[in-house]
Image: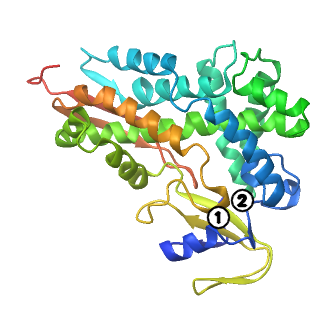
Amino acid sequence: MEFQGTTLATKEACVHALRQPELSSNPGGAMAGSANLLFMDNESHIRLRAVVRDVIGQLEPLPHQVTTDIRAIVQKLHGRNDIDLVADFGRPVAAIVAAAVLAVEQELTAELLDQISGTAANLGVWIGDSAPAGSAMHKVVRFFLKATAIHDGGLDRLRRARKAGEITEDELLVTPVMLVHAAYENSTNFLAAAALQLSQSPSLAEQFVSGSRQAGAVREMVNQICPTRHVMRRATKPLDVAGTHIQEGECVAISIGPPNALAFGTGSHSCPGIKVALTEAEFALREIAPLLAASWRTVSVEEKNHFVFHGLSHALIRRDSSSGD
């Protein structure tokens, strides 16, 4: 099933649309009362976003255990002649950060991580097809409903917010899924693609090793790769956006990927985790850069097929026989 609606492509139109209150983030219909932060507007969005920011803030700066675990993941890759930058780097690093966001005693198993990835299909509601995500969503909800929260971790903070009346029961069920998906899926997609770029450009990898362009390079790479290619909106009344007429009820896809350089969005729905995302990426890529600065060749790359998200299913690289570690 394909998206039926208007796609805005120019940066002018996209920035205007992201700041336009008449373009609702809620798909309407069965989702009109959704407890998902992504589908909220106005006061309810502001209220829940404040709680989410508190949860994300616990990772600013990245805890020592997170950086230690990321470093250990990269260390295991040294001496390897073949590396799948998705399975061996992107996913495990993202899983470490996702686990830290919610902070529960139970392990985020490989099976659960697959279910977390599967919840992305919930965005299919914008094209009238969200059924594939139903099972995945329910399994992830059940996991966090039963999980033992670590004191003052993300899930513990959400549960305390519910007791204080700051969020609803439905929001307590849905918000962990939204948070863990953002922390895991988006980071996996970016880290694997960024590492692939480093493996294909030793000079760029060397810049990470030396620190000469690190912070600016990461932000630039995020905008180039942009794991989320579109954000979706629905017109609550007829309006014109930078010369494009949109009818009431019409769905709109806003292009935030290249060349618009809007990876973290803008306006009220801009990414609340931008600082953590950039810090995580800067640290993880700096750790793997010395390894990728050697001579590698790309063996095979497979992209995911999703109308909103951009990522890789696998990215296998192989060390040239003449290169050293």
On the image, the x and y values in percent for residue 324 come to 13, 20
Left or right side of 185 for 32: right
Q: Image point 52% across, 37% down: which residue?
A: 276
Q: Nearer the viewer, mark 1 or mark 2?
A: 2
Task: Determine whether the residue tagged by mark 1 lies in a helix, strand or loop.
Answer: loop
Task: Say which residue appears at 63% left-offset and 35% top-offset.
Answer: 56
- Tell me which amino acid carries mark 2: Trp
Percent position (x, y) of residue 211?
A: 25, 37
Question: What residue did someone put label 1 on?
Answer: 3
What numbered label is drawn on residue 126? 2
Q: Relative to 300, is 232 above or below?
A: below
* Circle 2 SS class: helix
Q: Residue 93, percent across and down?
A: 47, 26
In this view, the residue in front, 108 or 118, is 108
Does residue 62 appear to the left or right of 128 in the view shown?
A: left
Q: Which mark is residue 270?
A: none
Identity, as a three-letter code, of the amino acid under mark 1: Phe
Contact, mark 1 vs mark 2 (Cβ under 8 Å):
yes
Residue, far left: 322
- Quadrant location, the N terminus: bottom right
Q: Is residue 320 visible?
A: yes
At x 80%, y 60%, the residue is: 42
Q: Is residue 198 left or right of residue 240?
A: left
Query: Which of the marked residues, 1 or 2, is nearer the chain's N terminus?
Result: 1
